[in-house]
Amino acid sequence: MSELQRVTIHDVARSAGVSVATVSKVINGRYGVALATSERVQAVIDQLGYESSLVARSLRSHRTNVIGVLVAEFEPFSTEILKGASQAIGGTGYELLAYSGGGRAGTPAGWERRYLSRLSGTLIDGAILVTPTVVDSGGAVPVVAIDPHAGPAGMPTVDSDNYAGAVTATEHLLGLGHRRIGFLGGRPDLESSRLREAGYRSALAAAGIADDDALVRVGGYRRENAQEPARELLTLPEPPTAIFAANDLSAIATMEVAGELGLTVPQDLSVIGFDNVPESALVNPPLTTISQPIQRMGSAALELLIHLMDGGTDRPTHLRLPTELVERASTAAPRRR
């Protein structure tokens, strides 16, 4: 057989010298097969690498024992979520399927319903939806949402404390002596973006600093989208001495723009991000950021989903995880001007 050819149940039966019905009994643990025959069939299965299709499995048992992680696109945040879910899947008896329709930030609202309709029933028994646009999945299979666009609203949800994290980020800059602090926000349609901006404004107000909308721009959570808004902030007649970017990719874009303008981070400009994705520690200088436990969000969502799939009702269906400051080298006291 070619290595590229799928091994079938007929191949197993032929190699083991038994009927297809006998192989089926062995696979499904049914009675009526002698121990020596069962061991021979299992050895052939292992040797050939046979695996029944998920569709066939679901038709037999109405279960696939597969959990889907559904995302609009694979970017640093969703990739870290997937890492956390994969770490937690071991020993559960479930397998993990990561799925994206290949969309980007412009993926139309409701993508999760389309993805679920393709996979539910024949490929997955439950799903983790990463930043879904809607909170009504249609009830096809049990679901848990991570950081939904509109925030928790009935669907079991895992997120992090975006507001408290933003307060911590702004207070860190204030504590260094910055008073003119810019904010590069995320996508306007996301609750996390709204909470991070609210935390930024709240911390300024608590410090007696009035709102200045001239220091606020929308970066959109994407590196390429954040560059022009960052440039606008840094070329103001009176530019900020520090910028809080609502995610790490926007913060990295801000540092790149600062370099193009001849500014040195952190001597001329302090920059702080949010997320603590792996890239944040690799830039020069390493980025000070607010760490949300992204991998833990993935593992917690998986654990909650399996609990719900098993009929559990004794856990809260909204889990909010804490954030914390990770201080690196991109923030410092402002230069005297």
Image (cartoon, helix red, strand yellow):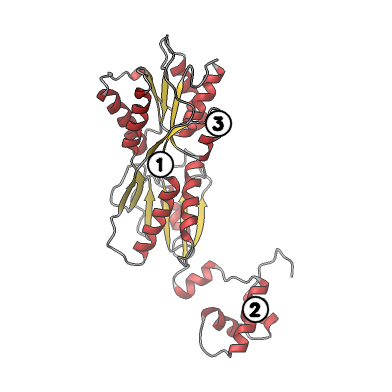
- x, y (%) of residue 38? 60, 85
Give the position of the N terminus as an image quadrant: bottom right
- Mark 2 or mark 3: name the one nearer the start of the chain: 2
Give the position of the C terminus as an image quadrant: top left
Instruction: Give me the disc on residue 292.
Output: 1
Kindly report the distance in space between the C-alpha atoms of the residues bearing marks 2 and 1.
46 Å
Between residue 311 and residue 329, name the one nearer to us.
329
In the rendered structure, which amino acid carries the disc numbered 2? Ala
Q: Are marks 1 and 3 in contact (CB under 8 Å)?
A: no
**In this image, 132 relative to 60: left or right?**
left
User: Residue shown at 57%/89% (left/top)?
Assistant: 33
State the image quarter where residue 169 is shown.
top left
Instruction: List the residue tagged with mark 2.
Output: 43
In the rendered structure, which amino acid carries the disc numbered 3? Val
**Closer to viewer: mark 2 or mark 3:** 3
- Mark 1 or mark 3: name the one nearer the start of the chain: 3
- What crowding class fits label 2: few (fewer than 14 Cα within 10 Å), some (14-19), or many (20 or more)? some
**In this image, 141 relative to 106: left or right?**
left
Secondary structure beneath label 2: helix
Instruction: List the residue tagged with mark 3.
Output: 283
